[in-house]
Image: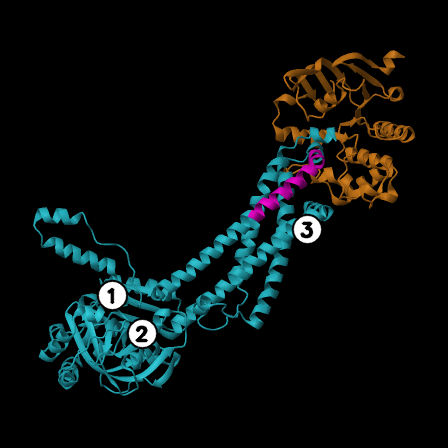
Amino acid sequence: MSLIDFQHVHKNYPLGKTIVHALQGVSFQVQEGDFVTISGPSGSGKSTILNMVGCIDTPSAGEVIIQDTHTSTLSDRQITELRHRTLGFIFQNFNLIPVLSVYENIEFPLLLGDSRNDPFKQWPEQEKCDWINYLIAQVGLEDYAQRRPAELSGGQRQRVAIARALATKPSIVLADEPTANLDSVTGDQIIQLMREMNQTLGTTFVFSTHDPQVLEVADHVIKIRDGMIEDNYRLSERI
Amino acid sequence: MLIKLALRNLLQHRSKSLIVGVLMAFGVMLLVVGNSVMSSLNKKMQASFTEQYSGDLFIYTDPVAKAQLVFEQRLANMPEKARQRAAQNPPDKEDNTSIFSGYGSGESAALPQLGDHWQELQELDFIHSLSPQTFGRAKIENGEGAEAGSMFWGINPDNWQTLGFTQHLQWHEGGLWQTDKPSIALGKDIADRYSKSQGKQLLPGDEILLTVSSDVGMTIRPVTVSGIFSFKTTAAPQLNFLSLIDMTTSQGLLGLSVDTSEAGQLNEAEQALISASSESDLFGGNDALFGETEAGSDNAADLEAELMASMEANRKKTNNVMQQYHFVVIKLAAGTSVIEAEKKLKLWFAERELIWKTGDWQKAAGFMAEMTKNISMVLDGFMVLIGAVSIIIIMNTLVISVTERIVEIGTMRALGAQKRLVRKLILLETLVLAVAAGSVGILLAAISLAVLNFVGIDPPNAFFNMIFGGEALFPHLSIGAVGNALLMMVAAALIASLYPLAIALKVSPVKAMQG
């Protein structure tokens, strides 16, 4: 059973009087524990695919199934709950909350649930604290836990974003061009860190990139061009 | 976490928070100072009225019920067709009664059945003391051309004393009468006008003639001036035109004696005096009540002795009978609320099928109370205007603040924040700001009021002199005003946050991806 199942997904945007066909019948599956890159040139539809997987955008046609859940049938509230429990996000611009410290930023997703059966609210406080400190240690920011994002470098901010994405122990972490705003060395370090977390925690990572070097570390590559899949292969199959 | 986030966001956007906060604090300060001043003014006016002449409550004939009663009686005596026609024009439902006017004159204006219930009324446990009174307008003359007009209350000095009113009179000459002789204490303005008219100073012991035109005809009585006074308060300009007359004489003048036919009928001497000056001489001209006329009576002095004898005879006849009055002023027992007493009295009247009604000091004050209400309304209108402008400015600032945080809100939504949480966060930020700014505003208002209380607000002109009761106003911080201001500020903040909130709730998580 696939963790993510894209079935003939179309996405059309109105742009003035014309319609832009951002995705044209895209279909693919992602297995649990995969380290997936979605690559392609700018405007090819990478981010649109990530938005669909992240349930923050809906397809014009076709089906997006996440963990056996047909996302098109869910209400806004259910979709939000699905995102909260199942998905983690790493953004190109980090998107940390500027008024919160590193520790608080990582803790933040754990405080967002407002339903009575929210699993994170039932977590013992000490366990929660240990988990956050573990994540901080994993991303190498032990000495920066009380710093605000404005006091960190780009690479450090993205590390915080990775830790935050993993805070809720999601099945899937989505990263939209996570290295785009970083220099190549820092970018490599971030990719390595994500790979380590993927292997350590078994979390599925799906990230978009147009950096050919990144493709070498992925075990599942989906190449997109003009809203259609150009190539879709697992590294093990190629070997 | 949300409170922490709200506080830090406010600090992060310091300049915007400061703009909104200063506006809110200024608004609250204005509200608290304005309402506290009005509250102090209201209390001062209330004290001016209740302590000096209106009492806590007054009882009077319900003019609407009475008019309806008379109307129904009139209909009952009409033939069918005329009744149907007349029924289409029911009496006026307006009640303009105050202790300065609205009674008409003669027996028909008297408080009905007061004699039957007087004792019972006096014994009500929530009533401290009572003063039955009459009201009328009289022409004052000496029969030699000197004239002036005066409104008057017929009072019993003992009753007035128990209500504590006499100590608030400032005596320029003489004092209240202490004999059974027909007496009048003249208001200073009236006495001055009369003195000017007769060319010499009116003094206690002088005799003057009073003429009253009532439902039962025209009545003239000679009275002795016991004193010349003015009310200490200037809160009601009507007081300048008011004199006090002994009760028996006032009832005789107004035809309120039980044997009204006698009071209303003039003997030969009175008829002769009236024939000496026409009605237009007495009340005509531009200033009917207070004007001076040149007409006089040559034989007035000769008639005075006869009038005195006639009056004395009337007095002896009516002295031991429960007379009729226009209204009863009440001082409530300590700790009794006016509203509660009014409720009890209303029930008491209903049980006895009396067409009596109660009025508080504002009703007694008539147009003066209306004026303070109107000032309050103008002030409220001004506050609403300030509130509306503040809401618009606060709303704009919040819109800018939300717009700048679109990505942050989108990120929260992407990470799993429900719309409810975003709503909570925005409202919390607004409320924290409103409460903080409101507290600063209250503090500033308290300081301003303390300063004003220390130095006092002198009435800047004659109008405010009247409103302030002739003294400086020393306003106090009103707890009610503080509560109202805080409530209004929170309401304004909530209203101002509605549109920014709508924008925030529409933010899609996609905005997080778009950066």
Q: Which residue is mark 3?
A: B18
Left or right relative to B184: residue A164: right
Chain letter behind tag 3 = B
How packed is label 1: few (under 14 Cα within 10 Å), some, or many (20 or more)?
many
Mark positioned earlier in the residue sequence (1 or 3)? 3
Q: Are marks 1 and 2 on the same chain?
A: yes
Would you say residue B409 sits in the magenta stretch? yes
Is label 3 in a helix, a strand or a loop?
A: helix
Viewer-side label of 1, 2: 2
Nearest to viewer (mark 3 / mark 2)? 2
Chain A is which colour? orange
Looking at the rendered structure, which numbered label has been put on residue B103?
1
Region in magenta: B389-410
- Give the chain coloured cyan: B
Name the residue carrying label 2. Answer: B242
- B511 to B124, vertically: above or below: above
Depth check: B72 or B291 in front? B291
Helix, strand or loop for the magenta stretch, by majority: helix
> As shown in the figure, which amino acid type bears the numbered disc 2?
Leu
Graded by Cα atoms within 10 Å as few (under 14), some (14 to 19) or many (20 or more), the crowding at tag 2 reads: many
Secondary-structure class at tag 1: loop
**Mark number for residue A233?**
none
Identify the subunit bearing mark 1: B
